Image (cartoon, rainbow, N blue to C red):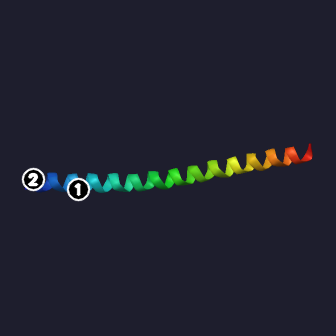
């Protein structure tokens, strides 16, 4: 019985880690999109400034 409990705890831990990995991957994707938007904004500003000179 103790072995089954230990096995269950290991499986629960693996499941938790997989969910955490998925959440972190989603967060990373969102952060990268935000960085990409910021870079595009800066690029457009630089182009606009160059065009007005």
Q: Specify the quadrant that holds the N terminus.
A: bottom left
Residue drawn 75% across the image and 47% down it: 43
Image coords of residue 6 (percent x, y)? 15, 51
Q: Is 17 left or right of 41, judged from the image as shown?
A: left
Q: Farthest left residue?
A: 1
SS for dot 2 = helix
Q: Which of 4 and 44 is in front in this view?
A: 44
Q: Is 50 left or right of 30, judged from the image as shown?
A: right
Question: What crowding class fits label 2: few (fewer than 14 Cα within 10 Å), some (14-19), or many (20 or more)?
Answer: few
Q: Which of 51 and 21 is in front in this view?
A: 51
Q: Which quadrant would residue 30 be assigned to in this image?
A: bottom right
Image coords of residue 52 (percent x, y)? 91, 46
SS for dot 1 = helix
**Residue occupied by mark 2:** 3
Residue drawn 16% across the image and 54% down it: 7
Residue drawn 30% across the image and 57% down it: 15
Residue drawn 74% across the image and 50% down it: 41
Image coords of residue 44 (percent x, y)? 78, 50
**Residue occupied by mark 1:** 11
Vertical position of residue 3 compared to residue 50: above or below: below
In this figure, what is the number of numbered marks?
A: 2
Image coords of residue 34 (percent x, y)? 62, 51
């Amino acid at each position: 019985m103790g072995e089954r409990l230990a096995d269950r705890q290991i499986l629960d831990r693996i499941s938790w880690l997989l969910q955490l990995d998925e959440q972190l991957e989603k967060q990373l994707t969102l952060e990268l999109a935000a960085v990409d938007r910021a870079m595009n904004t800066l690029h457009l500003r630089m182009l606009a400034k160059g065009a007005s000179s």
